[in-house]
Amino acid sequence: MDYALSAFAVLLFAAVIFLVEGAWLWWSNSHGGGARRIARRLHLMSRGENGADRITILKQRRYADAPWLDHLLRRLPRMAALDRLLLQSGLRWQVGRFLGGSALLLLAAVASPVLAGMPALAACLTVGAGAAAPYALLLQSRGARLRKVEQQLPELSDFLSRALRAGHSFANVLQMAGDEVPEPLGGEFRATYEEINFGVPMNEALQNLAARVPLTDLRYLVIAVLIQRESGGNLAELLGNVSRITRARLKLMAHVRVQSAEGRLSAWILSVLPLAVLAMMSVTNPGYVSVLWTDPVGVKMCWYAASGCVVGIVWMRKVVRIRI
C-alpha cells in the first residue's frame, strides 16, 4: 500500500510539472515577445504594398547611414559598381562616406592652387591628383587584398581536399574553411557558408563568392565544385588538381615578375626623373626655371612635356605589365 501511494504521489507531482510547463509554453508561443514580433511582421506584410515595403528579410548593404541619402544614392548610376569595389577592397566604408571624402579632397585640391597662386599647369596637376587619389587608394587596397587572397588559394584548395577525404560534407568543409583559414579568404568562405545556412542555394552562394572575389584561380575552384555537383566525380581530386594549377601559375607569375623587374625599375626612374629635376632646379635656380610658367612659350612647352610624359608612362606600363 505504501508503494502504491508513493507511486501515485510521484505521478501526480510529474503531472503537475508537465501541466505547468505546457501552460508556460502555450503562453510563450501565443502571447510572448517572439509571437508578438511575428504577428506584427505578418500584420505589416498583410497591409499590402505600403506595408510590405517597410520590411524585408534580405540583407542589403547600405550606401549611407541616413535613409534619405541611401535612397538617393541607390537611384544614381554606377553606385552599385562603386559599392562592389568597396566590398572587394575590404575597406569598411560606405558609398556615401567614400563620396563625401572624395568631394572634400577635391574641394581642397581646387582651393589650394588659388590660395597658393600656382601656375596653370601645377593647378591642373593638383586638381587631377586630388580627384584621382581616393579612387587610386581604393584600387590599390583592392589589388593588395586580391593578391593576398590569391596567395592563400593553394593552401585553401589543399585544405578543402583533405577535409573531403576525411569524410566531411562540402557544407561542413565550407564552415571549417571559414573558421580555420586566416583573413581575408576565411571571411569570404564564412560569408558563403552563412548564405547557405540561411537558405541560399549552394550554386548561387558559390557564384556570389566568385563575384565578390574576381580571381581566375578562385573561379576555377568554383567551376570545379559546380561541375562536380552536376555530373559527379571525385571532388577531392579535382580540388587537388586546382591547387597544383594555382601553384604552377603563381610560380610562373613570380618568375615573370623577376624577369621584368629591371623594366619596371626603369619605368619608375623615367617617370619620376622629370619631376625630380624640375623640383631640384626650382630650388637651386628658380629664376631660370620660372620661365616655363611665366612665358607663354614656356607654358606651351610644359603642356607638351606633360602630355609626352603621360603617353610614355602609359606605354611603359603596357610594356612591363605581362598578364598570365
Image (cartoon, rainbow, N blue to C red):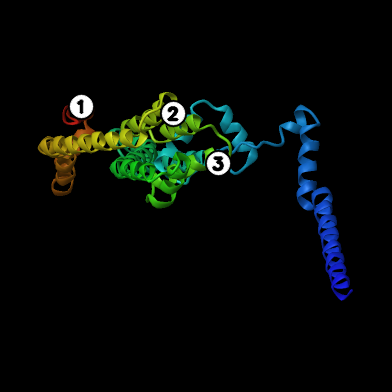
Q: Pointer 1: what residue?
A: 318
Q: Amino acid at mark 3?
A: Asn
Look at the image and tell me in which quarter the N terminus lies: bottom right
Q: Amino acid at mark 1?
A: Lys
| Residue neighbourhood size for the residue with mark 2, other residues' Cα within 10 Å, grouped as few (<14), some (14–19), many (≥20) | few
Would residue 269 appear left or right of 56 to someone viewing this image? left
Query: Which of the 4 image quarters holds residue 321?
Result: top left
| Residue neighbourhood size for the residue with mark 1, other residues' Cα within 10 Å, grouped as few (<14), some (14–19), many (≥20) | few
Q: Pointer 3: what residue?
A: 197
Secondary structure category for the residue under label 1: helix
Q: Residue at x 28, y 33 (%)?
A: 121
Secondary structure category for the residue under label 3: helix
Q: Pointer 2: what residue?
A: 229
Q: Residue at x 24, y 33 (%)?
A: 245
Closer to the camera in the image, 91 or 114 = 91
The Cα–Cα distance between marks 3 and 2, rounded to whole angstroms, is 18 Å
Q: In the rendered view, would you say 34 is above or below 114?
A: below
Which label belongs to residue 227?
none
- Circle nearer the viewer, 3 or 2: 2
The Cα–Cα distance between marks 1 and 2, rounded to whole angstroms, is 40 Å
